[in-house]
Amino acid sequence: MDGTIRENTVDEIKSRCNIVDIIGGVVRLKKAGSNYKGLCPFHKEKTPSFVVSEEKQIYTCFGCGATGDVIEFVQKYYNLDFPEALQKLADSCGVTIESSYAGTKNKDELYSINKEAATFFFRAFHKTGSPAYEYMKKRGINDEVLKKFGIGYADTEWDSLYKHLKEKDFPEEKLVDLGLISSSKGKYFDKFRNRVIFPIINTRGKVIGFGGRTIGEDMPKYLNSRESSVFLKKNNLYGLSVTRSEMTKTGYAVLVEGYMDVISLYQRGICNVAASLGTALTENQAKLLKRYVSNVVLAYDSDEAGRKAAFRGMDILHREEFKVKIPHMSEAKDPDDFIKAKGRSAFIKLMKEALPYADYKLTAIKKEVNMKTTEGRVDFLKKAVEVLKTLGPVEADIYIKKLAAETGISEGAIRAEMDIGKENKKEEKPRPGGDGENKKKGKATVSRLEKNAIKLMLADESYINDLIDYKDMFQSVAGKNIFEAISSLSKKDERPDLEKLSGMLEPEDADVLKDIQETIILAGKEEEVLKECIRAYHEAANKKREKELIMMISMANEEENSEEIKKLTEELMEIQKKNRNGGK
């Protein structure tokens, strides 16, 4: 969903979606007076403190303080941004969201085609005698998991899908664009034949593409949809639409290479798993994953190609500030084989024993050199220092001491080597700042507050430090992306000039950046603008909290929550006092 959203559309969605029905679909609610109560889905609790008001159409938790309306619940529960949450609710209640940007109608039709194809494959899979169904059952996957991932079957006919989609009046050129159909000498035929089909679904619940695994001896073994305006492999992770909530609960993600790895692990209780769609992990995929977790175990195949892919992947994850680990999976060629042979407990143990980024890198370097020779030790030191330079000061200090103790190389020598060539450090290649599908046209939605803050950081990098603790003031997608790009340059001690920043952003966000640079005038009043930005930030935060407190107090049961009401009332009075004093 692109473009600006009409206010009356938001109101219509809210009016059609009963918050009790929406939340009741994922939380067991019981009637409690005029409200409903249940266990909070956002923190662990044994006694229900989560209250939903049908009358006010709001929810609140007296345990963790979570509160909001139906849209805010969907955002928080499913880890969606505002447009994605709105689209999810719109789909459930039959509201069409009109967009102001061209191309949306075309994308909607492509999504419809993919959805129809997924349904066709799904039905074929569940027909009696389906070879794909028998194959997946032999791989140990049960019906519940097969349905959850929407597994399908492309039969052996040359044009069964083509005929089906033509009956639905979908244009042939779009079937070809999506890679569902191929053409030769004026004839059309199905691209996927005699394959298990894995629908690829984005975090908005849209079918964007397909992966097909051959059942027979056909090559290639795996075949993917071609890339299109709705499907870019670099921007998506297989399984994330199903597993992201479990990632949030466990606090980490297990990244694997293949579709079967995801499904096999999920089948056996490792539900915080996703795959990088058969390609090397990309920065955009890492940014997408960053919405849900900051810890990743990179469980790629144990062959040479898998190890190289893991090495590249952990570098990308480390640059995106994940805490990343790699397990030593020598007893099996991939996670699917390992968990089938060893079981869930052994796999969890393997994940816990996985080596952190620096340990894995340094261990790999040791294997490349002969530590018994002077030449080998010097070579090791030079390579090890390159790893240490990627760490923060505290972490680097710990590893310097650890290396000195393990290798006999003095701390002084290691530190001296780290300083050599520091002034001539090569400039790192700017990283793209986008996760593809999450990029929206942000120009119309970036607030004046965000624009002023961004202009300050562009005017003088010293303002970056002044604003770093106020990153929550960037609420729009474009604002957040620009702020992250500026921050990443700041960490490298690079000046955030317009050209460099534009190269790190998607075109839509780069346009927003250019607009800010050209239209926002500070007129020598930088310090005044900074103070106003911080004041406005606090004022907005206080008003938001005031609204939350009023919600919570209005929903509290006076007999059950008297002490809690007293505390909330005291906080509310303090917040209201601050609001009267301009946020102070």
Image (tube, rainbow, N blue to C red):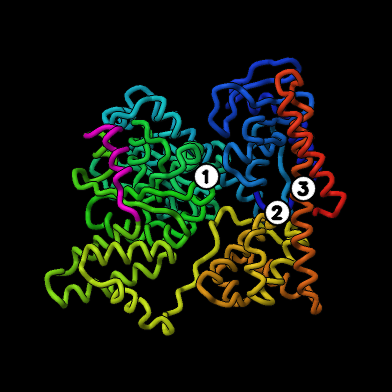
Relative placement, left or right, of 463 versus 209 is right
* 1 or 3: tag closer to the N-terminus: 1
Residue depicted at x 79% and y 34%: 569
Q: Residue 480: where, in percent of width, then height? A: 63, 59
Residue 542, which numbered label?
3
In the rendered view, would you say 551 is above or below 319? above
Which residue is label 2 attached to?
Answer: 3
In the rendered view, would you say 97 is above or below 427? above
- Identity of the amino acid at label 3? Asn
Magenta-drawn stretch, dominant element (helix, strand or loop): helix
Q: Residues within 10 Å of mark 3 (few under 14, many from 20)?
A: many
Q: Residue 131: where, in percent of width, then height? A: 30, 30
In the rendered view, would you say 422 is above or below 334? below
What secondary structure is found at the residue carrying circle 1?
loop
Query: Quick one: 49 or 332, which is closer to the camera?
Result: 49
* Residue 34 in view (yes/no): yes
Q: Residues within 10 Å of mark 2 (few under 14, many from 20)?
A: some
Which residue is label 1 attached to?
Answer: 202
- Identity of the amino acid at label 1? Asn
Residue depicted at x 34% and y 54%: 356
Range drawn in magenta:
342-356
For the view shown, which residue lies furthest in the right direction?
Answer: 580
What secondary structure is found at the residue carrying circle 2?
loop
Whole-number angstrom distance, CA of label 2 to CA of label 3: 29 Å
